[in-house]
């Protein structure tokens, strides 16, 4: 029985916005979790950057966004509340790259 979380599970459960917390305990927990991500990233020799993994985590897929400015994009379809994510091009993954990351992470489970 495997008790250690898979790399994919760690990425999914990590609070990617911990650094904005005013609560020191949330900051410490997020910092510890980020250290675990870095350790697993290095140990697995992950071919993707942490930034790409974060974009994968939030499904920031270029084809799901439309260009709204010089370097700005907005999600074509909002969430169940109608909110549409906004992002710079550099924060988005092409669908083929997203799928490649997803396959690689699934193979590590």
Image (cartoon, grey):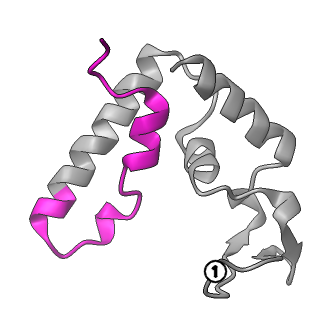
Q: Which residue is pictured at 48% across the width and 16% down the height?
A: 44
Q: In the current view of this chain or complex, which residue is farthest to the front?
A: 1
Find out whether residue 17 is within the magenta segment: yes
Asked if 34 appears above or below 102 in the picture, the reply is below
- Residue under label 1: 80
Q: In the current view of this chain or complex, which residue is farthest to the top?
A: 1
Q: In the current view of this chain or complex, which residue is farthest to the left?
A: 25
Q: Which residues are magenta?
A: 1-27
Task: Say whether residue 26 is left or right of residue 13.
Answer: left
Task: Say whether residue 68 is left or right of residue 90.
Answer: right
Asked if 12 appears above or below 5 in the picture, the reply is below
Which quadrant of the structure image shows residue 53?
A: top right
Task: Say whether residue 15 is left or right of residue 52.
Answer: left
Residue 42 position, x and y percent, is: 44, 20
Q: In the current view of this chain or complex, which residue is farthest to the bottom?
A: 82
Which quadrant of the structure image shows residue 86?
A: bottom right
Asked if 103 appears above or below 60 in the picture, the reply is above
Q: In what element is the residue under mark 1?
A: loop
């Amino acid at each position: 029985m495997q008790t250690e979380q898979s790399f994919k599970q760690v990425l999914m459960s990590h609070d990617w916005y911990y650094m904005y917390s005013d609560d020191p305990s949330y900051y410490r927990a997020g910092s510890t979790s980020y250290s675990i991500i870095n350790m697993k990233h290095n140990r697995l020799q992950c071919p993707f950057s942490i930034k790409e993994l974060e974009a994968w985590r939030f499904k920031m897929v270029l084809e799901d966004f439309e260009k709204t400015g010089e370097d700005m994009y907005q999600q074509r379809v909002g969430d169940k509340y109608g909110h549409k994510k906004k992002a710079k091009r550099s924060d988005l993954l092409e669908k083929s790259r997203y799928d490649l990351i997803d396959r690689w992470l699934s193979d590590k489970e």
